[in-house]
Image (cartoon, rainbow, N blue to C red):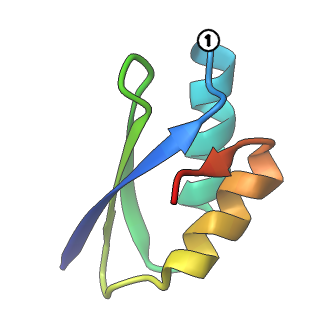
């Protein structure tokens, strides 16, 4: 089990949260996605560590950016 936290920029509402959660949760092996709108923190729990570029691509697909 692996848990990683990322910062996502550009989220302003619960719709944003749902979009990010929906895209990231589709990544194979992801078990849970927690999104904190106020801090922009996205915590991903997965079976195995997931490459940050895979997370970045999913966040981008949702219309937001992963902070550097």
Q: Is residue 50 above or below residue 3?
A: below
Tell me: 10 left or right of 2.
right
Which residue reaches farthest left? Answer: 1
Tell me: 43 left or right of 55.
left
Q: Where is the N terminus found, in terms of image quarters?
A: bottom left
Tell me: 47 left or right of 24.
left
Please name the residue shown 36% across and 64% down the image. Answer: 31
- Residue 34 pos. (x, y %): 35, 40
- Residue 22 pos. (x, y %): 63, 45
Q: Is residue 15 above or below residue 18?
A: above
Q: Is residue 33 above or below residue 15?
A: below
Which residue is nearer to you in this view: 11 or 19?
Answer: 11
Which residue is nearer to you in this view: 65 or 15?
Answer: 65
- Residue 62 pos. (x, y %): 76, 45
- Residue 42 pos. (x, y %): 40, 45
Task: Give the residue pinned by disc 1.
Answer: 13
Q: Is residue 39 above or below residue 58?
A: above
Q: Secondary structure at mark 1?
A: loop
Please name the residue shown 62% across and 25% down the image. Answer: 11
Please name the residue shown 81% across and 55% down the image. Answer: 61
Please name the residue shown 72% across and 42% down the image. Answer: 64
Tell me: 1 left or right of 30.
left
Number of marks in the rendered image: 1
């Amino acid at each position: 089990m692996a848990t990683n936290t990322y910062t996502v920029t550009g989220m302003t509402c619960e719709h944003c949260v749902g979009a990010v959660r929906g895209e990231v949760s589709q990544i194979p092996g992801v078990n849970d996605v927690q999104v904190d709108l106020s801090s922009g923190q996205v915590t991903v729990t997965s079976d195995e560590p997931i490459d940050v570029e895979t997370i970045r691509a999913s966040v981008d697909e949702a219309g937001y950016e992963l902070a550097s």
